[in-house]
Amino acid sequence: MKKIFKKIMFVVMASAMAFGFAACNDDDDDENTSVDSKVVGTWETVSMELDGEDLGIYVELELKSNGTGYSSSVDNPNKKDKFEFSTTGSTLKLVINGNTYTYQYDIRGDVMSIVGQGVPGESMEGTFVGTFKKKSSSSATTVPANMVGTWQATTHTVGTSTVARDIRITIYSDFSGIVSDEGVTENNDFDFTLSGNNMYVTPRHGGPGFAIPFTYSINGNTMVLSGEYGGPVDLGAGGAYSATYTKIAK
């Protein structure tokens, strides 16, 4: 993508991922396992890439506080394969069929990914990035009617800088949208999900390769959009993003 989300300073986030995991023993008790409490929960795949190429694999992960994990494919959710994991600092270790895989991880909000060499549980070499979003029963199944339409902002705050830029975001009712940056829309389309007042945006062309978390609020024809990792386009500055958008078309 030429514009959208290229300068987002997203620290690689994460938790354990797995696919093709074979079941290990069924003993869930391991009192000595070190687990970051933030990784505990159920996570859905946003993307998995090897050397920048999308693997097209989507799994759901259930990560327990005792260091036991289960993975299941979206095609066969009832078949759960077991693995073990632990965290130390920013290091995540997965144990699959007696083999240990080591990655670096970080978690920001409800979005996560891991990064390292090789695909867990597979004989596939290269730089692996897996990104996930925490599953929530509150995830929206429809786009709010007051969110649908075209929104314009001309002033944006990025870090400590104020940037003047004509940016228009058009949001559709099918969880898709497009950004116009000074009139340019080519390759700036995206998909998104909603959970509470959080908006997770995934660019369709390029971008960082995972869903970008934003927080939004709408009051009448005014929408405030903010995030920790930059704005919806390259604004020439880094840091937390905030801007007020005005609806100009329904």
Image: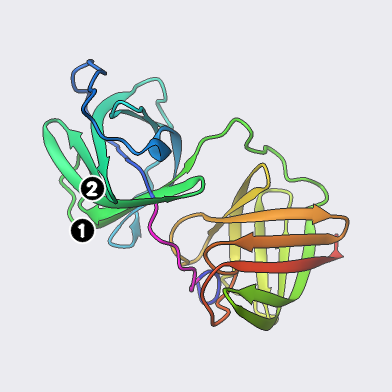
| Circles 1 and 2: CB atoms closer than 8 Å | yes
Q: Quadrant of the C terminus?
A: bottom right
167 sits left or right of 36 in the view: right
Which residue is at 30% across, 25% downward?
66
Q: Earlier in the sequence, mark 1 or mark 2?
A: 2
Q: Amino acid at mark 1?
A: Gly
Residue 12 magenta-drawn?
yes
**Picture coordinates of residue 166, whole percent (x, y):** 72, 80
Magenta residues? 6-13
| In the foreground, 250 or 106 | 106
Q: Residue at x 77, y 67 (%)?
A: 245
Query: Which residue appears at 22% of the width and 39% of the height?
Result: 94
Q: Which mark is residue 119?
A: 2
User: Mark 2 falls on what kind of element?
Assistant: loop
Three-letter amino acid code at disc 2? Val
**Is 177 or 132 nearer to us in this picture?**
132
Residue furthest toward the top? Answer: 26
Name which residue lies at 22% across and 15% down: 27
Find residue 113 and report its horizontal and vertical position in percent.
38, 50
* Magenta stretch prevailing secondary structure: loop
Q: Position of residue 231 (x, y in %)?
A: 59, 69
- Relative image position of residue 59 (x, y in whole percent): 39, 36
Residue occupied by mark 1:
126
* Front one among 237 and 119: 237
